[in-house]
């Protein structure tokens, strides 16, 4: 089995700003930890340096006016209609090189897609990707260009059948919207309920429209949901849908902002639940394009995506983080010295009410979506 890891240190040339929760250094930390564990030196692994996408690649999904605006904003200053299209102080700041950064992130996703679609290997991972909130003509939720949508469109143009699984704490609204009316792409999003978290969508009754009815699937979890209920709901819904749909490629958004100590969200997952879900995806996916996503505790991001990459390569890692890594990471505030930590250090979550709510949601999905999804 061959796998590819797409990465460049050039991501570090860009910065959302000193007070913004999305810190690009998390990508470098992840890369360093993966390398420190020796996971890029495996004979089955190809390291692919990121190339920029082209404007034409972006135009496969985004509107021309919006892309022109992003290009103008590349200088780091706001122009005319920027505010109307989601840019400005706050979630989607105009920072120098934001368009160049978007070209890099999307380019890496397309390289991952091509690696898999060309048959060079089974799995490719772009940790910088997964910017799932960007809309056709609007920036949203720290996302300017929707690389998952552009990657999936490339796969469709190459005749592939695609299932998209999004395990970020936030609903994968941009991806759902792009494929809401087609049965060519099955989108499944597991996230904290829109009642308590941005972007306020992703309810179970959003199931697609027209030809796409049944091909959008949502599992909204109440705040405080822990590993057990989360993994239970995943098992009840995702494997059966993947078996029914029979994709050629599974594209995943692997956000790490579901963890109990993420500063922006209210779910209570741990790295143990995350690992269980990743192992299941590995077993379900005939081919797998893995993308990053949210994650605002940088230690969680580095450890969870390193664990994810180990799962993709069928490797068991030792629990102690390599010393060469934590000595450097400590300077950036990373205190963890263990890959997973002890389960007893995570908060115990009383899940009875959440389980009842999720039993209702799962039942609803089984009644409405399961009969519709076919190969
Ligand atoms: Zn998120």
Image (cartoon, rainbow, N blue to C red):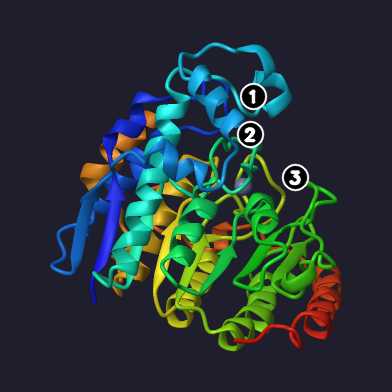
Q: Measure the alpha-carbon separation of dots 2 and 3.
A: 12 Å
Look at mark 3 in the image and give the residue it sits on: 199
Q: Measure the alpha-carbon separation of dots 2 and 1.
A: 6 Å
Q: Where's residue 293, x and y in %?
A: 52, 49
- Place residue 165 in its image quadrant: bottom right
The foreground one among 334 and 198 is 198
**Measured along the vertical axis of the image, is residue 43 above or below residue 175?**
below
The foreground one among 269 and 114 is 114
Query: Is residue 227 visible in the rendered structure shown here?
Result: yes
The image quadrant where one finds the C terminus is bottom right
Q: For the point 72% across and 49% down, which residue is it?
A: 266
Would you say the residues marked 2 and 1 are in contact, meaning their CB atoms lie under 8 Å apart? yes
On screen, residue 365 versus residue 156, left or right, reads: right
Q: For the point 40% across and 28% down, which residue is it?
A: 100
Residue 207 numbered tag: none
Element class at badge 3: loop
Mark 2 / mark 1, whichever is N-terminal: 1
Q: Measure the alpha-carbon separation of dots 3 and 1.
A: 16 Å
Q: Where's residue 8, x and y in %?
A: 28, 40
Residue 87 numbered tag: 1
The mark closer to the camera, 2 or 3, is: 2
Look at mark 2 in the image and give the residue it sits on: 139
On screen, residue 150 versus residue 264, left or right, reads: left
């Amino acid at each position: 089995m061959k796998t590819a890891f797409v990465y460049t240190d050039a991501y570090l040339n860009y910065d959302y700003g000193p007070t913004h929760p999305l810190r690009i250094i998390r990508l470098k930390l992840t890369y360093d930890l993966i390398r420190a564990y020796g996971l890029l030196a495996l004979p089955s692994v190809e390291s692919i340096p990121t190339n920029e996408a082209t404007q034409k690649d972006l135009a496969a999904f985004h509107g021309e006016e919006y892309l022109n605006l992003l290009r103008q904003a590349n200088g780091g200053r706001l122009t005319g209609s920027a505010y109307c299209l989601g840019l400005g102080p706050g979630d989607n700041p105009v920072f120098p090189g934001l368009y160049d950064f978007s070209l890099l992130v999307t380019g890496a996703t397309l390289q991952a897609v091509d690696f898999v679609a060309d048959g060079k290997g089974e799995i490719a991972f772009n940790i910088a990707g997964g910017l799932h909130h960007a809309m056709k003509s609007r920036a949203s939720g720290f996302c300017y260009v929707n690389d998952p949508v552009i990657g999936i469109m490339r796969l469709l143009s190459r005749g592939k059948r695609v299932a998209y699984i999004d395990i970020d704490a936030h609903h994968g609204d941009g991806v759902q919207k792009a494929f809401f009316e087609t049965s060519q792409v099955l989108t499944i999003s597991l996230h904290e309920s829109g009642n308590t978290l941005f972007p306020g969508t992703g309810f179970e009754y959003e199931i697609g429209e027209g030809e796409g009815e049944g091909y959008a699937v949502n599992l909204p979890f109440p705040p405080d949901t822990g590993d057990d209920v989360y993994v239970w709901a995943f098992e009840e819904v995702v494997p059966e849908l993947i078996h029914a749909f029979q994709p050629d490629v599974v594209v995943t958004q692997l956000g790490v902002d579901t963890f109990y100590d993420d500063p922006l969200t209210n779910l209570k997952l741990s790295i143990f639940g995350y690992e269980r879900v990743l192992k299941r995806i590995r077993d379900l996916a005939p081919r797998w394009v893995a993308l990053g996503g949210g994650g605002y505790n940088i230690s969680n991001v580095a450890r969870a995506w390193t664990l994810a990459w180990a799962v993709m390569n069928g490797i068991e890692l030792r629990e102690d983080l390599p010393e060469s890594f934590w000595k450097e990471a400590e300077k950036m505030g990373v205190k963890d010295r263990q890959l997973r930590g002890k389960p007893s250090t995570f908060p115990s979550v009383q899940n009875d009410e959440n389980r009842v709510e999720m039993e209702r949601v799962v039942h609803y999905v089984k009644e409405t979506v399961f009969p519709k999804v076919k190969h």
